[in-house]
Image (cartoon, rainbow, N blue to C red):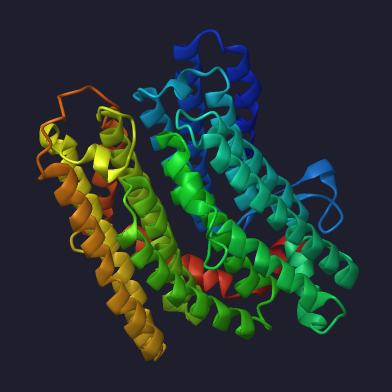
Amino acid sequence: MNTAYLLVPLLLPLMGVPITLFMRKQRRMQSVTALMLMLISLGFSFGLLRTVQTTLEPVQFQLGLWQAPFGITLAADLLSVFMLIMTQLVLCAGLIYALGSTEKVVQYPTFYPLFLALSGGLSGAFITGDIFNLFVFAEIIVISGAALTAIADDKYGVEAAYKYFYISTLASVFFLMGVGSLYVAYGTLNYADLADRIAVNPAAPLGLTGMAFLTATFLIKGAVFPFHFWQPDFHAAAPTAVSAMLSSLVVKMGVYGFFRMTTLLFATEADMLKTLLVVLGVVGVLYGGFGALGTHNAKRMLAYSTLAQIGFILVGIGWGTPLSLAAALVFTFNHAIIKAAMLMLAGAMASRAAVKSASFDVIVGVGKYHPFAGFLFLLGGMALAGIPPLNGFVSKLMIFWSGVEAAQYLSLAIIGVASIVTLVYIIRAFTRVWFESNPEVKPKQGDQLLAPTLLILLALLLGVWSEPLVSIAQATAAWILEPGAYIAAIMGGG
């Protein structure tokens, strides 16, 4: 049964791709099937969490019965399961939003198969125990994400998809160069075996080269400054159900990569990398915040906001203490929920405008006819800014407290002051859409609000009752800071 908990969250979305393609002429059945597959996957992911917490070791499966490091390993430790549940929870919300969307793209016969491919790629990226297969799943994410953006209703969708595809091709080259360098240096690509060999011989030729290439890869994947330039266009042009996934989940693959690099693969040589993450994180908080303040499109504003939020997470990883890592994990989870909800609300307002666009010039005054959406947006904005009692408050409080504990006063002061900018651009957006008058705006039906409502309720719940999430994050931080246990479990065969 433990193996089923591991395999089902990966296989169901991937199996759903051909299944939903066969249903391409029964669109309603196709969409409901996709949602049911994701809900079942989410249920098994929670079962996987319970199993890992009970056994206190990774659940693993060796493909072809080849023991590690000779075969392909699928392994779910606390970090993998944490990221997996976050991902599938938001993906389910994305499918719920698509079910109530008025966009033409959700009626395309390939929309739900591509969405499930994106889901399978993300799930596989978090539970693979082999760095080459991480590359494979990353390519599935790129191909499906680019295709979903290219078929968007937005006229700039194809341009944005090309930008993403080409920058991702560069990341793929870096990724393969990193994988190749590490294989030449250490003769293995299994996470556990590779970490063990790097710890024994950290100065092996091409070892640092591999580390550098992987760093560049995950900086691009995470849209970290200065590798962020593809992100605002890509996320703003994508269908709302997809952009909510891209800005909240896809960039987290870079975050996951840095968690693995600093605590497992290069745990004993990570000081230089951690310093880099702190510097880039601080710059990202500043650049993303002021970028969001200066843009004139709600979706682009939230895309730039992601740069700032990822900056907070990188700072937590860079500080590297148990509390800061737990804070980074809590921030990662909470940001996924908040940002998906906010992008859905921006898309819902755009769908009700005279011209379907998230430009503030178009959606100004639209919210006057939809006060409930304004209430949700205000709550989401409060969460994004870190105002109690929303979950964003817990995230920022843990980050700030961990900075004090680590005596990182300079970087803490900078991100603390810069975080105030979040309130400014959220209030500006809220005022323009829900309070300013626009005589050209007429009542109009648009995308349904069920999905963002559920996510905002979850954000409120995790703000009022944060103990379960914080406890899991603390346990995960403690686990990843002891890489020997992971290595022993995988190399010992589980």
- Left or right side of 223 for 423: left
Depth order, front residue of 268/52: 268
Which residue is at 79% across, 74% downward?
Answer: 209
Q: Can I make out residue 316 in this image? A: no
Report the label total: 0
Q: Which residue is at 53% across, 58% downward? A: 229
In this rendering, position of residue 179 left or right of residue 140: right
Please state, as top left, top right, bottom left or bottom right, where the N terminus lies in the image.
Answer: top right
As drawn, which residue projects farthest toward the top? 25
Task: Specify whether residue 475 is in view.
Answer: yes
Percent x, y for residue 289? 35, 66
In the drawing, does residue 215 fall left or right of residue 157? right
Pinpoint residue 134: horizontal percent, then vertical percent. Answer: 70, 52
Question: Which residue occupies the foreground of this view, 261 or 76?
Answer: 261
Position of 425 with respect to 118 (left or right) is left
Q: Taking 163 as reference, is 463 above or below it?
A: below
